[in-house]
Image: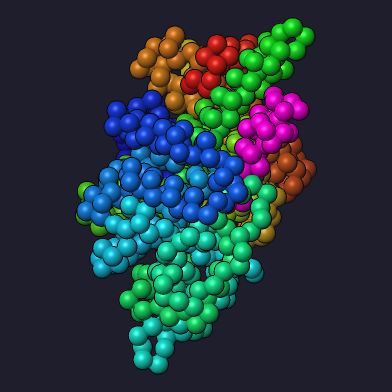
Amino acid sequence: MSNTIKGGEFVIKETSYNDIFIPEEFDEEAKMIRQTCIDFLDTEVLNKLDRIDAQEEGLMPSLMDKAGALGMLGVSIPEEYGGFGKNFNTSMLVADAVGGGFSFAVALSAHTGIGTLPILYYGNADQKAKYIPKLATGEWKASYCLTEPNSGSDANSGRTSAKLNAAGTHYVINGQKMWITNGGFADIFIVFAKIDDDKNLSAFIVEKDFGGISMNPEEHKLGIKGSSTRQVFFNDCEVPVENMLSERENGFKIAVNILNIGRIKLGAATIGSSRMVITQAVKYANERVQFNLPISKFGAIRYKLAEMATRLFATESAAYRAGQNIDDAYETLVSGGMDEAKAKLKSVEQFAIECAIIKVWCSEMLDYVVDEGVQIYGGMGYSAEAPMERAYRDSRINRIFEGTNEVNRLLVVDMLLKRAMKGEIDLMGPATAVASELLAIPDFGQEDETAFAAEKKIIANLKKAGLLIAGAAVQKLMMSLSKEQEILMNIADVIGYVYIAESALLRAEKLYHTKGPEASADATDMAKIYLYSTIDKVNVAAKEALNSFAEGDELKMMLVGLRRFTKSEPFNVKDARQRIAKKLIDANKYCF
């Protein structure tokens, strides 16, 4: 794998299929870990969903104990603390495999992610030795206390306070936290609070047994009803000074970096959910007979099945591409002498733009999949007796979890522009070149007829469309661009769709070169279906942005350029979808 790519550089660089990882490349050990997780869901979780949603006393903690005994909670925890010490992409695979577990997936993800990783990555040696082994086995369950009634997306505005006692031995914490996943059974709380008049949050490891902790009853929620969600109150909760995590006022940085990990892991979990929903939808379409035919014979249903599979294939391609980029960055940092825990954080931080994109596009993919799943089931889709009702409700939280999709879209552009201003990514050079290209005569040179050449040219042009609007917006609006959220989200849509489409295409290209044209035909179909829908989405988003800030001859010229950059040869999407649908229907499951 190549280690040269930086986070966000895909916007200005062409990526080779040789430099990406695809899910088909997981080794046998990773596949065995994945299968263990899937088997656990089948035997311990999916047959208890109603009991889990009813929050049967002790059931969720007992499931966490069983998962811990199998090692599912310690996959990415170093062996010295009782874990398996696997790389980031393998931990992504676990999130994917568990993703079909509804509320159980939420409990496990919160524990292994935002509950455990702050200590693993920011804790000192004593803290890690004390807490991580027990978190790895599930003996202690973890939660994460950041959100407050008046601080959600604006996390650093939290009012929970921490004051050093007169003896200098304990911080006394007072405040209220809400939407705390695992709150009802957690032994450990990662709590964010401000010390005195500090500008930024500090973080603390708080044990339930410290006292001064009380809770509201369980929240009644639209979905993930089996996930324990409580308001947690800290009333003169005394926390030993040695339980501060990292340094004073480093809490906000901890929160941001851990959320980067949470975002991409959430994307992986939605992949597992979607795979299960598509399989259920295919089976039902094959069983349900109308007009003397299984409904899987009808074009409208086949369209839905193929489109569901295509969106899953594309977002899955992006998730594991980024996961490997994170692993590669980590290896480079460690080989350069960086501390392993610090390197873990830096590698994820490097690809924070990709993490945000994956969070947004995967959660919206799952919402599309469950919505069409309900539609394929028809009236039964609306019944709580059938599986789609729970999937539909449980999906909705993912566009809010780990930062709303609106915030994440804004972050994509904000991080990209900040890196450009710091000189980490040369955005303005390529953007200026694209602007100059508008004045040049189009290149009508000989067409490249090698495999995927036409599609790669489309990707390159779509990137130019993104650079065109981003460069023009920066020049025109300058400092006021940060206030133009609609335009920023237009730019984010272009960037995100191009990243997902390119990832799907690179995966198809890699399979083509490693397995041959016939074995990669399905991947090629799905990559092309996704790409050709992306062209129109990029065109709409870019046009909206340009119409928002440009005018006159300048606008006309840029719209002409946009038409040039979003042009393509015709492609029969219907026939490609029919081929994908047939594969699904014949296999009676998601089979890619």
Would you identify the image quadrant in which residue 128 lies?
A: bottom left
> Which residue is located at x 40 percent, y 29 percent?
23
Which colour style is shown?
rainbow
Does residue 477 sit above or below 467 in this rendering? below
Tell me residue 516's x, y (percent): 39, 11
Q: Nearer the viewer, residue 136 or 396?
A: 136
Count of numbered marks:
0
Tell me residue 210's x, y (percent): 41, 75
Question: Is residue 383 inside the magenta stretch?
Answer: yes
> Which residue is located at x 29 percent, y 32 percent?
29
Question: Is residue 400 inside the magenta stretch?
Answer: yes
Say which quadrant the N terminus sits in.
top left
Q: Residue furthest front?
A: 57
Tell me residue 194's x, y (percent): 50, 77
**Is 313 displayed left or right of 93 in the figure?**
right
Does residue 17 sit above or below 152 in this rendering? above
Would you identify the image quadrant in which residue 120 lies?
A: bottom left
Residue 576 in view (yes/no): no
- Magenta residues, as a range? 373-402
Q: Nearer the viewer, residue 418 or 363?
A: 363
Q: Nearer the viewer, residue 59 or 434?
A: 59
Tell me residue 226's x, y (percent): 57, 49
Does residue 444 sit above or below 421 in this rendering? above
Residue 479 in view (yes/no): yes
Type of secondary structure dominating the magenta stretch: helix
Would you identify the image quadrant in which residue 337 lies?
A: bottom left
> Which residue is located at x 42 percent, y 36 percent?
40
Q: Residue furthest top?
A: 292
Q: Nearer the viewer, residue 535 or 512?
A: 512
Q: Residue furthest bottom?
A: 166
**Is 90 displayed left or right of 293 in the figure?**
left
